[in-house]
Amino acid sequence: MIEALALSKRHGSRPALDDVSFTVPDGVLAALVGPAGAGKSTVLRLAVGLDRGSGAVLFDGEPYSRLPRPAHAVGVVLDPRALHPGRTARGHLRSLAAGAGVPRRRVDEVLEQAGVTGARRSRPQHFRRGAALRLAVAGALLGHPRTLLLDDPLTDLDDDSRAWLLDLLRVHADGGGSVLITASRAADVLAVADELVVLRRGRLAARGPASDLVAGLKAGVLVRASDPGLLAGAILRWGGDVEPCDDGALVVTGLDMAAVGEVARAEGVAVHELSRRTADLDAALLSLELPETELLPGANPGAVPGASAVPA
Ligand SMILES: Nc1ncnc2c1ncn2[C@@H]1O[C@H](COP(=O)(O)OP(=O)(O)OP(=O)(O)O)[C@@H](O)[C@H]1O
Protein backbone atom coordinates (compact mmCIF):
# COMPACT_ATOMS: atom_id res chain seq x y z
CA MET A 1 0.00 0.00 0.00
CA ILE A 2 1.12 3.53 -0.76
CA GLU A 3 0.08 6.32 1.57
CA ALA A 4 0.80 9.93 0.62
CA LEU A 5 0.27 12.06 3.71
CA ALA A 6 -0.09 15.83 3.57
CA LEU A 7 2.58 16.31 0.89
CA SER A 8 3.63 19.91 0.35
CA LYS A 9 6.50 21.42 -1.60
CA ARG A 10 7.42 24.99 -2.53
CA HIS A 11 9.77 26.36 -5.16
CA GLY A 12 10.60 29.74 -3.69
CA SER A 13 7.28 31.39 -3.04
CA ARG A 14 5.44 29.12 -5.49
CA PRO A 15 3.70 26.04 -4.11
CA ALA A 16 4.34 23.00 -6.30
CA LEU A 17 2.27 20.78 -3.98
CA ASP A 18 -0.12 21.82 -1.27
CA ASP A 19 -1.32 19.32 1.34
CA VAL A 20 -1.87 16.37 -0.98
CA SER A 21 -3.00 13.10 0.63
CA PHE A 22 -4.16 9.89 -0.99
CA THR A 23 -3.84 6.14 -0.64
CA VAL A 24 -3.21 3.38 -3.17
CA PRO A 25 -4.25 0.10 -1.51
CA ASP A 26 -2.84 -3.30 -2.43
CA GLY A 27 -4.35 -4.64 -5.61
CA VAL A 28 -5.05 -1.19 -7.03
CA LEU A 29 -3.72 0.52 -10.13
CA ALA A 30 -4.02 4.27 -9.53
CA ALA A 31 -3.27 7.13 -11.88
CA LEU A 32 -2.15 10.56 -10.73
CA VAL A 33 -3.48 12.86 -13.42
CA GLY A 34 -3.36 16.57 -14.05
CA PRO A 35 -2.12 19.08 -16.60
CA ALA A 36 1.55 19.97 -17.09
CA GLY A 37 2.94 21.54 -13.93
CA ALA A 38 0.19 20.14 -11.67
CA GLY A 39 2.78 18.49 -9.41
CA LYS A 40 2.63 14.83 -10.48
CA SER A 41 6.39 14.28 -10.85
CA THR A 42 6.96 16.14 -7.60
CA VAL A 43 4.82 13.57 -5.77
CA LEU A 44 6.94 10.72 -7.13
CA ARG A 45 10.22 12.50 -6.49
CA LEU A 46 9.20 13.19 -2.88
CA ALA A 47 8.09 9.56 -2.54
CA VAL A 48 11.57 8.22 -3.29
CA GLY A 49 13.52 10.95 -1.53
CA LEU A 50 14.79 12.71 -4.67
CA ASP A 51 13.20 15.97 -3.60
CA ARG A 52 12.61 17.69 -0.31
CA GLY A 53 9.31 18.91 1.04
CA SER A 54 6.97 18.20 3.93
CA GLY A 55 4.62 15.34 4.63
CA ALA A 56 5.42 11.70 3.98
CA VAL A 57 4.96 8.85 1.56
CA LEU A 58 4.84 5.43 3.17
CA PHE A 59 5.20 2.06 1.47
CA ASP A 60 3.49 -0.58 3.60
CA GLY A 61 3.97 1.79 6.50
CA GLU A 62 7.62 2.69 5.88
CA PRO A 63 9.20 5.68 4.18
CA TYR A 64 11.43 4.84 1.21
CA SER A 65 14.52 5.90 3.13
CA ARG A 66 13.85 3.26 5.78
CA LEU A 67 13.15 0.34 3.48
CA PRO A 68 15.90 -2.20 4.14
CA ARG A 69 16.06 -3.23 0.46
CA PRO A 70 14.20 -0.55 -1.51
CA ALA A 71 14.51 -2.24 -4.93
CA HIS A 72 12.78 -5.29 -3.46
CA ALA A 73 9.84 -3.20 -2.27
CA VAL A 74 9.36 -0.38 -4.78
CA GLY A 75 10.10 -0.40 -8.53
CA VAL A 76 10.61 3.12 -9.82
CA VAL A 77 10.64 4.54 -13.35
CA LEU A 78 11.20 8.29 -13.38
CA ASP A 79 13.29 8.98 -16.48
CA PRO A 80 13.81 6.04 -18.86
CA ARG A 81 16.64 7.98 -20.55
CA ALA A 82 18.74 8.18 -17.39
CA LEU A 83 21.31 5.63 -18.55
CA HIS A 84 25.04 5.17 -18.53
CA PRO A 85 26.10 5.98 -22.11
CA GLY A 86 28.77 3.27 -22.29
CA ARG A 87 26.70 0.29 -21.13
CA THR A 88 24.66 -2.18 -23.11
CA ALA A 89 21.07 -2.85 -22.09
CA ARG A 90 22.14 -6.00 -20.29
CA GLY A 91 25.14 -4.24 -18.75
CA HIS A 92 22.83 -1.52 -17.48
CA LEU A 93 20.56 -4.06 -15.80
CA ARG A 94 23.51 -6.02 -14.40
CA SER A 95 24.83 -2.90 -12.77
CA LEU A 96 21.39 -2.13 -11.30
CA ALA A 97 21.09 -5.73 -10.10
CA ALA A 98 24.51 -5.61 -8.44
CA GLY A 99 23.61 -2.36 -6.66
CA ALA A 100 20.30 -3.79 -5.46
CA GLY A 101 21.63 -7.15 -4.32
CA VAL A 102 19.67 -9.02 -6.99
CA PRO A 103 21.16 -12.22 -8.49
CA ARG A 104 22.57 -11.80 -12.01
CA ARG A 105 20.30 -14.46 -13.51
CA ARG A 106 17.32 -12.22 -12.81
CA VAL A 107 18.61 -9.80 -15.50
CA ASP A 108 17.82 -12.19 -18.33
CA GLU A 109 14.38 -12.89 -16.85
CA VAL A 110 13.38 -9.23 -16.82
CA LEU A 111 14.89 -8.63 -20.28
CA GLU A 112 12.64 -11.36 -21.56
CA GLN A 113 9.63 -10.10 -19.63
CA ALA A 114 10.14 -6.66 -21.17
CA GLY A 115 10.56 -8.09 -24.67
CA VAL A 116 14.01 -6.55 -25.17
CA THR A 117 16.10 -9.73 -25.17
CA GLY A 118 17.04 -9.13 -28.83
CA ALA A 119 18.49 -5.75 -27.94
CA ARG A 120 20.40 -6.86 -24.86
CA ARG A 121 23.79 -6.12 -26.43
CA SER A 122 22.73 -2.72 -27.84
CA ARG A 123 23.51 0.59 -26.21
CA PRO A 124 20.17 1.87 -24.99
CA GLN A 125 20.81 5.57 -25.41
CA HIS A 126 19.84 5.00 -29.08
CA PHE A 127 16.66 3.13 -28.17
CA ARG A 128 13.31 4.50 -29.26
CA ARG A 129 10.94 5.59 -26.54
CA GLY A 130 9.15 2.23 -26.37
CA ALA A 131 12.33 0.16 -25.97
CA ALA A 132 13.83 2.66 -23.50
CA LEU A 133 10.69 2.49 -21.39
CA ARG A 134 10.64 -1.32 -21.51
CA LEU A 135 14.26 -1.40 -20.35
CA ALA A 136 13.47 1.02 -17.52
CA VAL A 137 10.52 -1.12 -16.45
CA ALA A 138 12.74 -4.20 -16.61
CA GLY A 139 15.10 -2.44 -14.20
CA ALA A 140 12.20 -1.59 -11.90
CA LEU A 141 11.11 -5.25 -11.81
CA LEU A 142 14.52 -6.67 -10.89
CA GLY A 143 13.78 -7.01 -7.17
CA HIS A 144 10.20 -8.37 -7.56
CA PRO A 145 8.80 -5.23 -5.88
CA ARG A 146 5.22 -5.16 -4.62
CA THR A 147 4.85 -1.50 -5.51
CA LEU A 148 5.48 0.18 -8.85
CA LEU A 149 5.82 3.94 -9.42
CA LEU A 150 6.05 5.18 -13.01
CA ASP A 151 6.24 8.81 -14.06
CA ASP A 152 4.44 9.60 -17.31
CA PRO A 153 5.04 6.19 -18.90
CA LEU A 154 2.43 6.48 -21.65
CA THR A 155 3.44 9.68 -23.44
CA ASP A 156 4.80 9.03 -26.95
CA LEU A 157 4.61 5.28 -26.46
CA ASP A 158 4.05 3.07 -29.51
CA ASP A 159 0.89 0.94 -29.48
CA ASP A 160 2.67 -2.38 -28.83
CA SER A 161 4.66 -1.06 -25.90
CA ARG A 162 1.60 0.67 -24.51
CA ALA A 163 -0.45 -2.54 -24.63
CA TRP A 164 2.46 -4.49 -23.09
CA LEU A 165 2.87 -1.97 -20.29
CA LEU A 166 -0.81 -1.65 -19.44
CA ASP A 167 -1.13 -5.43 -19.36
CA LEU A 168 1.91 -5.75 -17.10
CA LEU A 169 0.59 -3.09 -14.70
CA ARG A 170 -2.87 -4.69 -14.63
CA VAL A 171 -1.44 -8.13 -13.86
CA HIS A 172 0.82 -6.61 -11.19
CA ALA A 173 -2.11 -4.95 -9.43
CA ASP A 174 -4.36 -8.00 -9.82
CA GLY A 175 -1.61 -10.04 -8.17
CA GLY A 176 -1.90 -7.85 -5.06
CA GLY A 177 0.69 -5.15 -5.79
CA SER A 178 0.01 -1.45 -5.78
CA VAL A 179 0.74 0.64 -8.86
CA LEU A 180 0.89 4.41 -9.23
CA ILE A 181 1.45 5.99 -12.63
CA THR A 182 1.20 9.61 -13.70
CA ALA A 183 -0.47 10.91 -16.85
CA SER A 184 -1.26 14.32 -18.26
CA ARG A 185 -4.61 13.22 -19.65
CA ALA A 186 -7.20 11.21 -17.73
CA ALA A 187 -8.53 9.88 -21.01
CA ASP A 188 -5.24 7.99 -21.51
CA VAL A 189 -5.62 5.98 -18.31
CA LEU A 190 -9.36 5.76 -17.82
CA ALA A 191 -9.67 2.30 -19.35
CA VAL A 192 -6.98 0.84 -17.11
CA ALA A 193 -6.88 2.79 -13.82
CA ASP A 194 -8.98 1.63 -10.88
CA GLU A 195 -8.53 4.91 -9.04
CA LEU A 196 -7.80 8.45 -10.13
CA VAL A 197 -6.06 11.12 -8.11
CA VAL A 198 -6.56 14.42 -9.91
CA LEU A 199 -4.12 17.25 -9.24
CA ARG A 200 -4.68 20.85 -10.17
CA ARG A 201 -1.94 23.41 -9.53
CA GLY A 202 -0.45 21.29 -6.78
CA ARG A 203 -3.73 20.65 -4.99
CA LEU A 204 -6.00 17.67 -4.95
CA ALA A 205 -8.92 18.36 -7.29
CA ALA A 206 -10.60 14.96 -7.07
CA ARG A 207 -9.85 11.40 -6.09
CA GLY A 208 -11.71 8.12 -6.04
CA PRO A 209 -12.64 5.14 -8.17
CA ALA A 210 -12.27 6.13 -11.82
CA SER A 211 -15.73 4.83 -12.67
CA ASP A 212 -17.36 6.81 -9.82
CA LEU A 213 -15.59 10.02 -10.76
CA VAL A 214 -16.66 9.76 -14.36
CA ALA A 215 -20.22 8.79 -13.43
CA GLY A 216 -20.32 11.82 -11.11
CA LEU A 217 -19.60 14.29 -13.88
CA LYS A 218 -22.75 16.22 -14.57
CA ALA A 219 -23.71 16.23 -18.22
CA GLY A 220 -23.10 19.71 -19.48
CA VAL A 221 -22.20 21.95 -22.37
CA LEU A 222 -18.82 23.49 -22.92
CA VAL A 223 -18.97 26.91 -24.59
CA ARG A 224 -16.26 29.33 -25.66
CA ALA A 225 -17.53 32.77 -26.53
CA SER A 226 -16.33 36.26 -27.38
CA ASP A 227 -17.62 37.64 -24.08
CA PRO A 228 -17.75 34.85 -21.46
CA GLY A 229 -18.77 37.21 -18.65
CA LEU A 230 -21.79 38.56 -20.53
CA LEU A 231 -22.80 35.08 -21.62
CA ALA A 232 -22.43 33.66 -18.09
CA GLY A 233 -24.77 36.33 -16.70
CA ALA A 234 -27.36 35.63 -19.38
CA ILE A 235 -27.19 31.85 -18.83
CA LEU A 236 -27.86 32.36 -15.12
CA ARG A 237 -30.88 34.56 -15.95
CA TRP A 238 -32.17 31.81 -18.25
CA GLY A 239 -32.00 29.29 -15.39
CA GLY A 240 -28.73 27.54 -16.20
CA ASP A 241 -25.65 27.08 -14.02
CA VAL A 242 -22.19 28.14 -15.14
CA GLU A 243 -18.71 27.07 -14.11
CA PRO A 244 -15.88 29.09 -15.64
CA CYS A 245 -12.75 27.16 -16.69
CA ASP A 246 -9.22 28.56 -16.42
CA ASP A 247 -8.91 28.99 -20.17
CA GLY A 248 -12.02 31.21 -20.44
CA ALA A 249 -14.43 28.45 -21.46
CA LEU A 250 -17.72 28.03 -19.58
CA VAL A 251 -19.26 24.73 -18.55
CA VAL A 252 -23.04 25.08 -18.53
CA THR A 253 -25.47 22.74 -16.81
CA GLY A 254 -29.24 23.02 -16.72
CA LEU A 255 -29.53 24.15 -20.36
CA ASP A 256 -28.98 22.01 -23.45
CA MET A 257 -26.67 22.89 -26.30
CA ALA A 258 -29.39 24.48 -28.44
CA ALA A 259 -30.52 26.66 -25.53
CA VAL A 260 -26.97 27.84 -24.86
CA GLY A 261 -26.65 28.77 -28.55
CA GLU A 262 -29.93 30.69 -28.39
CA VAL A 263 -28.88 32.59 -25.27
CA ALA A 264 -25.63 33.57 -26.95
CA ARG A 265 -27.46 34.75 -30.06
CA ALA A 266 -29.94 36.76 -28.00
CA GLU A 267 -27.05 38.48 -26.18
CA GLY A 268 -25.13 39.15 -29.40
CA VAL A 269 -22.18 37.06 -28.18
CA ALA A 270 -20.14 35.18 -30.79
CA VAL A 271 -19.74 31.46 -30.04
CA HIS A 272 -16.32 30.00 -30.84
CA GLU A 273 -16.97 26.48 -29.57
CA LEU A 274 -20.01 24.61 -28.37
CA SER A 275 -19.59 20.97 -27.37
CA ARG A 276 -20.69 18.36 -24.90
CA ARG A 277 -18.67 18.64 -21.74
CA THR A 278 -17.80 14.96 -21.70
CA ALA A 279 -15.58 15.70 -24.71
CA ASP A 280 -13.18 17.34 -22.28
CA LEU A 281 -12.91 14.78 -19.56
CA ASP A 282 -9.91 16.44 -17.94
CA ALA A 283 -11.54 19.86 -17.68
CA ALA A 284 -14.60 18.19 -16.20
CA LEU A 285 -12.55 16.24 -13.66
CA LEU A 286 -10.62 19.32 -12.66
CA SER A 287 -13.82 21.21 -12.00
CA LEU A 288 -15.25 18.50 -9.71
CA GLU A 289 -15.97 19.60 -6.18
CA LEU A 290 -13.66 17.67 -3.85
CA PRO A 291 -15.62 16.43 -0.86
CA GLU A 292 -14.24 17.42 2.52
CA THR A 293 -10.88 15.64 2.59
CA GLU A 294 -10.91 12.99 5.26
CA LEU A 295 -7.35 12.78 6.46
CA LEU A 296 -6.11 9.28 6.96
CA PRO A 297 -5.50 8.17 10.51
CA GLY A 298 -2.19 9.63 11.54
CA ALA A 299 -2.10 11.96 8.55
CA ASN A 300 -0.45 14.56 10.71
CA PRO A 301 3.16 13.88 9.71
CA GLY A 302 4.28 14.55 13.25
CA ALA A 303 2.19 11.58 14.37
CA VAL A 304 3.49 9.12 11.78
CA PRO A 305 6.52 7.04 12.65
CA GLY A 306 9.19 7.80 10.08
CA ALA A 307 7.18 10.61 8.55
CA SER A 308 10.32 12.63 8.17
CA ALA A 309 10.89 10.54 5.03
CA VAL A 310 10.40 13.79 3.18
CA PRO A 311 12.42 16.22 5.19
CA ALA A 312 11.16 19.80 5.29
N1 LIG B 1 13.49 22.60 -9.88
C1 LIG B 1 12.42 23.39 -9.97
N2 LIG B 1 12.51 24.71 -9.77
C2 LIG B 1 11.44 25.53 -9.82
N3 LIG B 1 10.19 25.08 -10.09
C3 LIG B 1 10.03 23.77 -10.31
C4 LIG B 1 11.13 22.85 -10.25
N4 LIG B 1 10.65 21.60 -10.51
C5 LIG B 1 9.32 21.73 -10.71
N5 LIG B 1 8.94 23.02 -10.59
C6 LIG B 1 7.58 23.55 -10.70
O1 LIG B 1 6.77 22.80 -9.81
C7 LIG B 1 5.48 22.59 -10.39
C8 LIG B 1 5.16 21.12 -10.41
O2 LIG B 1 6.07 20.49 -11.31
P1 LIG B 1 5.93 18.95 -11.69
O3 LIG B 1 7.08 18.61 -12.59
O4 LIG B 1 5.77 18.14 -10.46
O5 LIG B 1 4.57 18.93 -12.51
P2 LIG B 1 3.97 17.75 -13.41
O6 LIG B 1 2.53 17.69 -13.09
O7 LIG B 1 4.78 16.52 -13.24
O8 LIG B 1 4.16 18.34 -14.87
P3 LIG B 1 4.56 17.58 -16.22
O9 LIG B 1 3.36 16.79 -16.64
O10 LIG B 1 4.88 18.71 -17.15
O11 LIG B 1 5.76 16.73 -15.90
C9 LIG B 1 5.52 23.24 -11.75
O12 LIG B 1 4.97 24.53 -11.64
C10 LIG B 1 6.98 23.29 -12.07
O13 LIG B 1 7.26 24.39 -12.94
Image: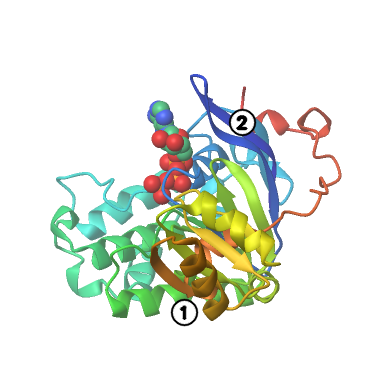
Q: Quadrant of residue 177?
A: bottom right
Q: How is the image coloured?
A: rainbow
User: Residue 112: percent from the left, percent from the top?
Assistant: 33, 75
Position of 243 relative to 260 (above/below): above
Q: Secondary structure at mark 2?
A: loop
Residue type at tag 2: Val
Q: Which residue is mark 1?
A: 167
Classify 82 as above or below 277. Answer: above
Q: Is residue 160 above or below residue 21?
A: below
- Circle 1 residues within 10 Å: few <14, some 14–19, many ≥20: few
Whole-percent x, y for residue 11 in the image: 48, 25
The earlier-in-sequence mark between 1 and 2 is: 1
| Residue 99 on image: x %, y % | 41, 44
In the figure, is residue 130 to the left or right of 137?
left
Q: Nearer the viewer, residue 189 or 200?
A: 200
Residue at 30% of width from left, 80% of height from top?
160
Residue reaching furthest top? 12
Q: Could one spot residue 180 in this view of the protein?
A: no
Question: Which of the image's four quarters has the C terminus?
Answer: top right
Identified by mark 1, the residue type is Asp
User: In which quadrant of this rendering is ligand 1 seen?
Assistant: top left
Tell which of 259 and 168 is nearer to you.
259
Q: Is residue 5 left or right of residue 242?
A: right
